[in-house]
Image (cartoon, grey):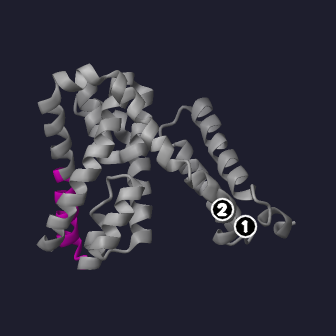
Amino acid sequence: MNDLLTQSTFFGVAVSILAYEAGVVLRKKLKWGILNPLLISIVVVIVLLLVCNIDYDSYYEGAKYLSYLLTPATVCLAVPLYEQISLLKKNFIAIAGGILSGVLTSLVSVLIMSVVLGLNHEQYVTMLPKSITTAIGMGVSDELGGIVTITVAVIIITGVLGNIIAEAVCKIFRIKEPVAVGIAIGSSAHAVGTARAMEIGEIQGAMSSLSIAVAGLLTVVGASVFAGFY
């Protein structure tokens, strides 16, 4: 039975979609922030592969087709930004300053934690691109000599945590301005966080979408500079 499933072209796709839908249903029914659909799908897939003794390569053979959709899905995030282009022009300086602050905060926090925890240089540069989208983060990590697979895991964890706690953090610090909320989420939790920003509001989603691209470019430059600090 396992062989029949794993040899199917759509096994990985089916498992991924069903696991995500299970997460969506749980989120709607229980309304718990920790029940993030992406987090639920990750856990379900890992448990399924372990219990059924299915190797990752067999699963990915089908799941890779979903990965192909990552780039066009990210590009589509430009649509809500285009719809809010007048807002971008009106608040350009504040938005640019907010994204720059978000990027610097991410890089400085990684530097401080690496010093405190005694990480070596390889581990340090692996963590630097934690707050940008996976496609860019992988390239940055590889260029700086980091461990790419760990970088991917860290990026996913950052995004999921951002998705779960973003709204609560904004409430705690009384961040109510839609533009500020969007910039904060996008520059710290990339595309996964942006999904949550879009749920919060249209403006938040648009600003978060902008932050993904700009924060990614700034991190490429900033990570190269910060890599020499430790």
Q: Tell me the kind of residue under disc 2.
A: Val
Instruction: Residue at 35%, 60% (x, y): give it.
Output: 137
The N terminus: image quadrant: bottom right
- Residue 51, numbered label: 1
Please identify the dominant SS of the magenta region. Answer: helix
Q: Is residue 13 left or right of residue 144?
A: right
Tell me if I can see residue 175 in this picture. no
Q: Which quarter of the figure has residue 175? A: top left
Rendering quarter of residue 187: top left
Indicate the secondary structure of the residue bearing disc 2.
helix
What segment carries the magenta color? 104-120
Disc assigned to residue 47? 2
Q: Are marks 2 and 1 in contact (CB under 8 Å)?
A: yes
Residue appearing at x 43%, y 63% in the figure: 152
Label 1: how many residues lie within 10 Å, few (<14), some (14-19) or many (20+)? few
Decide whether residue 31 is among the magenta residues.
no
